[in-house]
Structure formats: structure tokens, C-alpha cells
Image: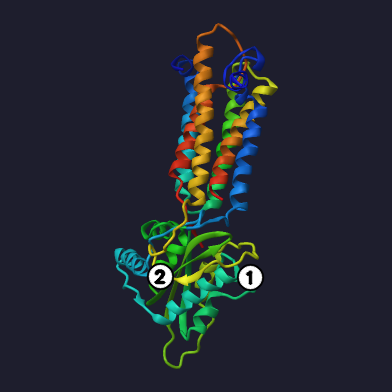
Amino acid sequence: MSDIVAHIFHPRRSNNHRPRLLHPEALFFVVLIASGFVALLHLFSGLTSANGSILGYASTITPKQVIEATNQERAQLGLKPLQLNQSLTQAALAKGQNMFTDQYWSHTAPDGVEPWYFIQQAGYQYRVAGENLARDFANTPNMVAAWMASPTHRANIVNSKYEEIGIAVIDGSLEGYETTLVVQMFGTQAGVGAKPVLGDADEAKVVQASGDAVKRSQASILASLLVPGGQVESPPLFTPLQLTKAFFLAVIILIVSTLIYDTFIIGNRDSIRIVGKNLAHIFLFIAVMYLIIFFRGGVVG
Amino acid sequence: MLKELNKHKLAYIILIIGLVLGVILFLGAWPDRQTQRMVAISIAVFYLLWGILTHFKTNQITGRVVLEYFGIGTLAGLLLILVTL
């Protein structure tokens, strides 16, 4: 056993004076292990324990917070605050439930239904309308920051043409994970006698430009109900992102430790070998480690 | 390590600048995951090229050295891409 460990981590004759872990073949094996880990994570995403889901995203987002944060962003640009509209909220809720039912993540449903359909079904006759989507965020500030960092979503939030807003924060299961979907519908009602239009051309473009199609899945719906964020009784134990980060950081720490150890051992020997530069590898992995630690989850659409 | 840094000062300055730029671009691209994946690939390619050029200049280049940089670059790039999935 100790011989195998030494072969993997200690530079010696059996591994050509370079820890086996740092050989190209071993590195490609680690690539396979990392890919396999992520594949398994997706494969077993639906695993549940007696207390609920093991994997998923818990959030503290509430509709009130989303409206306040949205209006704060608008106030900074001197724009009028958006007023909550019950019809738009109904439309947002219907859209969110439709995404869970049909298992998709996009502005346009797999059967071609667009956001405007839900708005009209809710009885809201609009002159202009728009939609922002978000999922997998733990809190409102991060989610709104992500929308503001995306030009198309920001354009919706700070659009002076909008007067009203509807928000749905819905917990459910999407692509096997328990998560929270946030649907933000914007609109301005058409004047009396005005002919309803199927979405302002510019707004429709904004909405469609930021959509990501997600494969339709046959996964069963575990839950699809409107609950205020933070009140989920049994939040998932881990988010898939947390597990991925922990595993990848462990892999990097193992490799960096081996590189440091190899540098130290070879530095005390008078042997010459032609291999890659340990210091450069360490710098690269420190940069990757930093990026993985500070990578922010959440998806906007 | 300090000896190695002083010996190839310019090469390491270029490497550090490239990596810092990569870090800034990757974090700055949030929440656009597609762009983040492109940056991850760019970091991996940059590292492979840096390794080849550095070893070429010091006449210490072999097929296995290139393969090692390819392996390290692939692993680093893949970890970043997988975390964005």
C-alpha cells in the first residue's frame, strides 16, 4: 500500500523521478474522474432522504424583496417605481408553474407558447411587456445583481416604458433538482379602446435574446406550489454547486500539494530531469482555485 | 522556487499577467456562463502556449513536456467549465 502511495506522490526511480500523479496519463485520468463526478451528480440528482431532497437549491427570496430591489435600481436612474399588478403576478405564477410542469427553462415553452400568452390569459391587456427569469439563487441581492449585470435583463428592469410588475417565486423540481424559480413580468396596460398587441417588438427581442433552451424531461414533478422563500420545511442538504466545488477543490489541493512536495524533494537532489515547470503549474491551479471558490451560482434567463 | 522565478523572470511575469487577466475576465463575465466557458478555454490554451514557448526558448522541450502542459491545461480548463454547468 505504502509503495503505491509513494509511487503516486514521491519522485523515485519507479516513476521516472516524477510523482505518478503529475504524469500526463494520470492527469488525463483525473480529467475523467472529474467529468465522471459531474455526470454522477446529474444522474443521482433526484436522490431523496427521509427528510426530503439531498441535492437542490434553497432560497430566501420573497416577491416583496424582488419588487423593492427592482424599484431601488430604477430609483437610482430617476425612474418611477413599478406598481404591483395582480394580473401580472398571476401571469408570472402561471409561467413558472408551466416551466415546472413541462420541465423547461426558457422564455418560450417547448410547444412554442410565449410569455405574452400567460399575460393575456391573466386578463392583462398590455401595450408593452417583458419577462425576466432566474433560478438557483440563494438570495434576492445576488439574483438582482445578476440581472443587472446582464444587458438584456437590465434593459427590462430599467425600462421607462413599464409601469407595473408581477412577481412569482415558486419552489419545485426542475431537471431533477429542487430549486426556486423567479418569474418577473413587466407591463404597461393598453389605454381604453387601444388594440392589444402581441408584445412590443423591442421587448420581445430582449426577452428572446436571453433565453436558454432546456431539454424536455420526463421527470415527475415533486412539487409546484407558491411558497414564500425561506419557508420550505426541508431544504435540500447540499446544492449541486457546493458539492462540485468541494470535490474540485480537493482535487486541486491534492495536485498542488504534490507539486510543492515534488519541488521540495527535487530541490534537495542533484538530479536533472526535463519536465514541466512546477511553479507555473502551481500558479495556474491557484488561479483556478480562486475562480472556483468565488464562482457565483444562479442562472438568469 | 525563488531561484526559478528569478531565472525566468519575464516568462513568469507574462504568465501571471495572463492568469490575472483570465481571472478578471472569468469573474467579470458573470452571469453569462457561455462567456465564462470561453474564458476557461482561453486560459487553458494560453497556458499550453506559454509552456511550449518557455520550454522551447530554454531548449528543454520534449513530447512529454508538451503533453504535460496539455494535461494540466485541459484539467484546469475542464474544472472551470464543469463548475459552470
Q: Do callouts 2 and 1 mark residues in contact (Cβ within 8 Å)?
A: no
Hey, which quadrant is residue B6 in on the image? top left
What amino acid is labelled 1 in the image?
Pro
Residue A27 coordinates in the image, percent (x, y): 63, 30
Hey, which quadrant is residue A138 in on the image? bottom left
A26 left or right of A140 in image: right
Residue A221 coordinates in the image, percent (x, y): 57, 68
Question: Which residue is drawn at the image coordinates 65% and 12% (left, top)?
Answer: A13
User: Can you name the residue that lies furthest to the right here?
Assistant: B63
Residue matched to label 1: A110
What amino acid is labelled 2 in the image?
Asn
Label 1 lies in what chain?
Answer: A
Residue matched to label 2: A159
A26 left or right of B4 in image: right
Establish whether labels 2 and 1 are both on one chain: yes
Q: Is residue B15 above or below residue A100?
A: above
Question: Which residue is drawn at the image coordinates 47% and 30% (left, top)?
Answer: B16
